[in-house]
Image (spheres, rainbow, N blue to C red):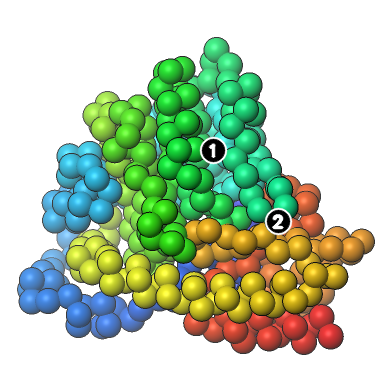
Amino acid sequence: MKVRDFLLERYFARYEFSVRHLLSPSDCESLRAEELLEGSGPGIAELWRELRLTYTESRGHPLLREEIAAASGVTSGDTLVLNPEEGIFLTMNALLDEKDHVIVLSPGYQSLYEIPKSLGCEVTRWYLKKENGAWKLDLPFLQEAAKENTRLIVINFPHNPTGFLPTEKELSAVVDFASKKGIFLFSDEMYRGLEHDPEKRLPSVPSLYRKSAALGGLSKTYGLPGLRIGWITSKDEWLLDRVASLKDYTTICSSAPSEILAIAALRRRDELAERCRAIVGRNLALAREFFSGRKDRFEWFEPEGGSTAFPKLLGSQPVRDFCERAVEEKSLMVLPDFVFDVDWNHFRIGLGRENFPEALEVLGNFLG
């Protein structure tokens, strides 16, 4: 398999652990393992105490799959535990063949379109529209883009990097279109639970449509990226069986300690998600004030969910140069839009860390 370098991950690898200030991470503030275990009750304490560092069940610990199912509106039999990135890689490999056509909501996480390309698929990128400082879903484009060989539509809500969240009616229109055409739907739901208004939370797609799969995980909504635990949910039994078989060639099974900590996290999922939403909410207010107060330099696009936003740098300076200067002059990492394969002069900011106010202050100093 031939695949391009992962632009976002290579950018982070270059700067994440060498600069003093990060303005653009997508995850939320993490917890210490002790903090997670202390508030999880005696059942978790017993599981942790009796844990043996041996192989785990390939599809995931039964208790973990039960918690995933409860959070996703499916049954435990509809779940499979894996690494989040692995979930994309294995599901795409299970579903797609050379010369299949794939439609991918864009801009987006590179592996969502790069893996299909590496498999010899034709990929159409379905871009969000920009209207009056807001992101919009272009449903007519989706309908026109579909072909006889369209095998897969890829969506991601809440959306990274823009923070866009469609209405339930818009999501239903996508599901109905896929259903009428018999097209499989892959829903990246890594940010589900981080809606800025929890009343606008969308149902998980597999609870709506059988020919679908959803990707979830602990990295974003729960602030636990170091556990490297995610999951695929689907009501398509063939797909889960195929992904489980392919997993034999990757991780085989998950980390035993990570699974117990993941059970602890999902038993406290409402508490942990609310904690992360609170951090995002505070930082969003600061970001809104900062960028809206500098309308000569930036165009602000209000996010509706997730832990990221995607403002635009105005003027003639390329955003890539702007970001490189920020690193060189202020040791501040800002993520330019080229890592999402667009050239819109946008950049991503991350709203989930407690030290966001400090990074924003450094950006202000950089601007002069």
Residue at 79 percent across and 75 percent down: it is: 294
- Residue 139 visible to an observer of this rendering: yes
Residue 304 lies, in percent from the top left, at 53, 58
| Badge 1 or badge 2: first in the primary sequence | 1
Say which of 298 and 3 sits in front. Answer: 298
Residue visible at 66% across and 81% down in the picture: 360
* Residue 177 position within the rendered picture, expressed as x and y whole percent measured from the top left: 47, 24
**Type of residue at label 2?**
Gly
Q: Left or right: 271 with respect to 288?
A: left
Image quadrant holding the C terminus, namely bottom right
Relative to 265, does residue 365 appear above or below in the rendering? Answer: below
Q: Residues within 10 Å of mark 1 (few under 14, many from 20)?
A: many
Quarter where residue 172 is shown: top left
Where disc 1 sits, the SS reads helix
The secondary structure type at the circle numbered 2 is loop
Residue 3: which numbered mark, if any? none
* Residue underneath mark 2: 133
Q: Is residue 186 above or below residue 34?
A: above
Q: Which residue is mark 1?
A: 115
Where in the figure is residue 187, as x and y percent of width and height?
A: 43, 41
* The N terminus - image quarter: top right
Residue 329 found in image quarter: bottom right
